[in-house]
Amino acid sequence: MAREQQQIGVLSALDAAKTQWYHFTAIVIAGMGFFTDAYDLFCISLVTKLLGRIYYHVEGAPKPGTLPPNVAAAVNGVAFVGTLTGQLFFGWLGDKMGRKRVYGITLLLMVVCSIASGLSFGKSPKGVMATLCFFRFWLGFGIGGDYPLSATIMSEYSNKKTRGAFVAAVFAMQGFGILGGGIVALIVSAAFDHAFKAPAYSVNALASTVPQADYVWRIILMFGAFPAAMTYYWRMKMPETARYTALVAKNAKQAAADMSKVLNVTLEAEEEKVIKLTTNQTNSFGLFSKEFAKRHGLHLLGTTTTWFLLDIAFYSQNLFQKDIFSAIGWIPPAATMNAIHEVYKIARAQTLIALCSTVPGYWFTVAFIDKMGRFAIQLMGFFFMTVFMFALAIPYHHWTLKPNRIGFVVMYSLTFFFANFGPNATTFVVPAEIFPARLRSTCHGISAASGKAGAIVGAFGFLYAAQDRDPAKTDAGYPPGIGIRYSLIMLGVINFFGILFTFLVPESKGKSLEELTGENEDEAGETELQSGPHRTVPV
């Protein structure tokens, strides 16, 4: 039987729908979750130096206090562990209970834990850090749920012509979240620095950290709750996606009724066709079946490995920007600044990078993903990330010289640009397209969790690896590492492996979701993804 005759009318209507107001509403509702995700995950890197000064000041030390290695690793990494857990759990739950029902839970968790992070309490530094880590774990757990649910909802609502751009636009809100974190930190630190004057650490170590500095990091962390809280009502008003309702819940009437309202057209409930498709043996295999391994095993391997490798490089760069900028002299030595002014300098550097490279990179992907295709953008991104990493690393001494520092920042910005106009966006988009509706959220969660495992490797590994090889020049409490130069070479090699694993990921441009997964086929039917060689480049 021909594929066209098998497709359910409601889903055909969604595939063929012109870009409408509801598409943009869905992007904003799903995207605000991602704004909060990025804000909460990355704003911690703006305040870790401040936390060290406030809670780990050592009397008479030549340099300001820093977080001990185990505390720094926990504060930076605990949200990622929560995110990884949340991606697996909520990804699975989204396929079991429906996307919409789980969507509100993740948002509430993010709002409550953002506020609670800023209210971290304790009589001792260890108590404050333990409370902060506890709440940041559960914050990460909520953030984790947003990855598979937002991607799946946007993918299932989109038409096939512009689906890549719509899903990428949701992810692009991450860029605004990183930018928002930098701007909030700039405003808060500038206001406090102006209101509470303090000398540099080298002038008066104790007076350089005013008591009010304790409010600065708390306000920055708590602000992440506001954008998420603002979209809760609209999330709850969104109808369940038609693909879940028809293909997983097997409720043709509800799917037709929901999409009739969304699309402003009258759609017929094709109950017989829904029953025929959903009871078909080819549409009932599970995640751990031989049939799944045969049809989608390589695809899942491709989406998990590329996201894992990308996030090692992406998160180690992002979380430790401040260390790289300090090393090349873009941020003055800590002893020459007071505590709050240091936050301002770090935030300024992150905001400039976000404004000049991170945000534009995301929107380049939105503009070109449905023209160039996912495969080409991902391959190109990994290639240029590899090139720029080696270009930074091999003549590293050249970049540390004062006349060349701006050149270093430009090159470093370009690696961010091609991460975002490249695999950082496509690894999010593709898993929401190439797996069957009943496993889509789960498989996206597995792919995303693999990415967060890479982020944990990047965050924890780079913390130690980037330390100077000279024991006298390492941060307090850290053993000597391999230095920033060799760390950058390692990241270049990791990006090269990303190029190789991209060849396992199929191209999904311009095809309906059911065409990609074979859910609109009768038992004799075959689809391009399952039959013949696994072609990755469109021809």
Image (cartoon, helix red, strand yellow):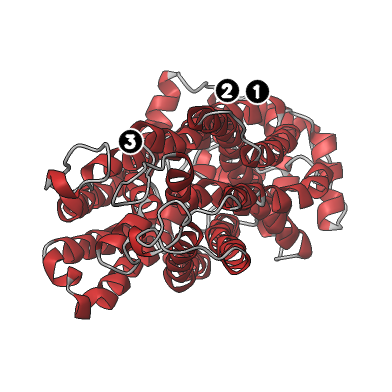
Q: Is residue 517 left or right of residue 332?
A: right
Name which of mark 1 and mark 3 comes first in the sequence. Answer: 3
Label 2: which secondary element: loop
Q: Is residue 427 left or right of residue 394?
A: right
* Residue at the image position 60 percent from the left and 56 percent from the top: 170
CA gap between label 1 and label 3 equals 55 Å
CA gap between label 2 and label 3 equals 49 Å
Q: Residues within 10 Å of mark 3 (few under 14, many from 20)?
A: some
Tell which tag, 2 or 3, sits nearer the viewer.
Answer: 3
Residue found farthest to the bottom: 403
Locate residue 82, reporting x and y percent.
52, 31
Q: Which mark is residue 399?
A: none
Residue 161 to residue 220: above or below: below
In the rendered image, which residue does mark 2 sit on?
284
Which of the two residues, 5 or 104, is positioned nearer the viewer here? 104
Kind of residue at badge 2: Ser
Locate residue 109, reporting x and y percent.
68, 34
Residue found farthest to the top: 289
In the rendered image, which residue does mark 3 sit on?
69
Residue 80 to residue 230: above or below: above
| Quadrant in the rendering for residue 372 | bottom left
Q: Is residue 162 left or right of residue 302?
A: right
Label 1: which secondary element: helix
In the rendered image, which residue does mark 1 sit on?
279
Mark yes or no: residue 438 visible.
yes
Kind of residue at badge 3: Pro
Residue 20 to residue 156: above or below: below
